[in-house]
Amino acid sequence: MSVITSVHNLRFAYPGHEPVLRRVNFNVLPGQILVICGLSGQGKSTILRLLIGLEKPDAGVVRLMGRDISFLTAQEFNELKKSVGFVFQNPALISTKTIFENVALPLIYHNIGDEEEVRYRVDNALEMLLIKEFQHQYPSSVSLGILKRAAVARAMIMRPKLILMDEPTAGLDRISRSVLLALIGNIRRINHVTMVIVTHDLLAARELGGEIGVLKEGELLEPMAFEQLKNCQDSFVEFLFRQLEEEASMLGERAA
């Protein structure tokens, strides 16, 4: 089975700073989900930026769809990125465009489909995210939960093989968070899309399923299922689970 995305011995430092990533390795197969957890400011989002070419690694190899992106021309890389959807932590919708227009933007930009095809694809995405009733509204008139769902709809509109998500549940209340996680799970199952999601929220990682890799001091611990991770003897992982118990208590949920 071909690997959708992988990194090998990835190393990265922002200018004038110590490396934020020292040795990161992982492979993600078609249809899999990798959730990368860790503390804020430790380089989780940087991994996504490296995958999509917004940053360049100091060392190591980044592959998308089996291709080493360092050897691609700008045109080749831009073509490859059509197979990748990106959900930023900030929904990043254009304030002067409606929800429908925002979701349609990638299709318009890449000149994909006629008006009927665009409407069909956008309607389908809005329905999957349960936000079709908001299609004519502007970002300023809807909640953060709706904005985040619209951002996911926009990321999937090109029918990508891979979707990258940066802290999708950040800032959401309990109900909006639960709805979004359920919808993300449905998208993965229905569309068989591969996902790499970064989050500080271990509860969200548990609900999303898949394997969880913990970023510790610039290195990614071997990804494993939630229950395996819970029994891991690593002191940093144990610290994260103590935090999880506190968060679960605040949310009225059980960590077990």
Image (spheres, grey):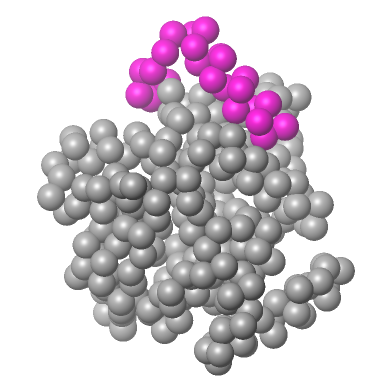
Pinpoint residue 97: horizontal percent, then vertical percent.
57, 27
Q: In this view, does 255 lie above or below 166?
A: below
Tell me if I can see residue 62 in this picture: yes
Residue lying furthest front: 1
Q: Which of 191 and 128 is in front in this view?
A: 191
**Quarter of the picture holding the C terminus:** bottom right
Pinpoint residue 184: horizontal percent, then vertical percent.
62, 45
114 horizontally vs 21: left or right: right
Pinpoint residue 105: horizontal percent, then vertical percent.
47, 27
Quarter where residue 168 is shown: bottom right
Pinpoint residue 241: horizontal percent, then vertical percent.
66, 81
Tell me if I can see residue 170 in this picture: no
**Residue depicted at x 34% and y 72%:** 24
Q: In this view, does 40 lie above or below 95?
A: below
251 horizontally vs 217: left or right: right
Q: Is residue 248 above or below residue 7?
A: below
Residue 2 in the magenta stretch? The answer is: no
State which region is magenta. 108-130
The majority secondary structure of the magenta stretch comes to helix
**Residue depicted at x 41% and y 46%:** 30
Residue 125 in the magenta stretch? The answer is: yes
**Residue depicted at x 49% and y 41%:** 193
49 horizontally vs 196: left or right: left
Q: In this view, does 195 lie above or below 239?
A: above
234 horizontally vs 239: left or right: left
Tell me how many marks there are: 0
**Residue depicted at x 43% and y 74%:** 222
